[in-house]
Amino acid sequence: MHLKKVEKLKNGKQLFVFFSNDKGRGKNNCTIQLVEGTEKRKLTAKLTKEVLKEVYTTSWKGDINFSKRIQKILGVKVSDLVRYSEIKRIDSILKVSQDEACNFKFDIIWMKIQQKKEKNGGSDIAIISNDQLKEFSRSMYSQGWKDHIFYEGQRNGILTEVNK
């Protein structure tokens, strides 16, 4: 679930989200604090004075593990979030666009394979060398990296557009 650094709840309280940049934190790289509505978010989680509840969870690029277990610890449901419908819409837009991009890239790769097949006389059997496999793997990784950069920009554009 894509949460902002401060999420307001329908009951007037707030959730503060703090992301860690520490490589060694492992699964606990995100801190979520439940605080009163009057509390101001500090620079770090340790500086927050009046914490009602606190939980550590995982996150990746703003996508936070806001599982049933985390919700139970905090005593908050996703429906308690003021922005719940907006978050749900953003998450679904991102998932659809990523799935479409993945399918599109696969189709392009498959077309290239089919072209090579036709070039080699239409045989369904092919032998490739380690160097060819290495080059194919490198191009796949490179394309994945380029797509990652593109979709980060897309995601930021979608988020900005939806939040306007």
Image (cartoon, rainbow, N blue to C red):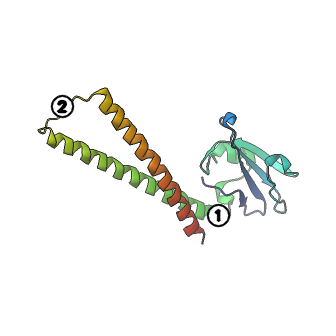
Q: Residue at x 43, y 45 (%)?
A: 144
| Residue type for callout 1 | Arg
Q: Identify residue for label 1.
A: 83
Q: Earlier in the sequence, mark 1 or mark 2?
A: 1
Residue placed most toward the observer, 81 or 145: 145
Q: CA distance from mark 1 to mark 2?
A: 54 Å
Outermost residue on the right side: it is 49
Residue 9 at x, y = what percent? Answer: 73, 61
- Between disc 1 and disc 2, the foreground one is 2
Q: Residue at x 42, y 43 (%)?
A: 142
Residue placed most toward the observer, 104 or 39: 104
Write down the quadrant of residue 28 in the picture.
top right
Residue 152 at x, y = what percent? Answer: 53, 55
| Residue type for callout 2 | Ile
Relative side of 40 to 109, left or right:
right
* Marking on residue 5: none
Q: Identify residue for label 2.
A: 125
Under tag 2, what secondary structure?
loop
Q: Residue at x 69, y 43 (%)?
A: 21
Q: Residue at x 27, y 45 (%)?
A: 110
Mark 1 residue crowding within 10 angstroms, few (<14) / some (14–19) / many (20+)? some
Residue 115 at x, y = what percent? Answer: 20, 45
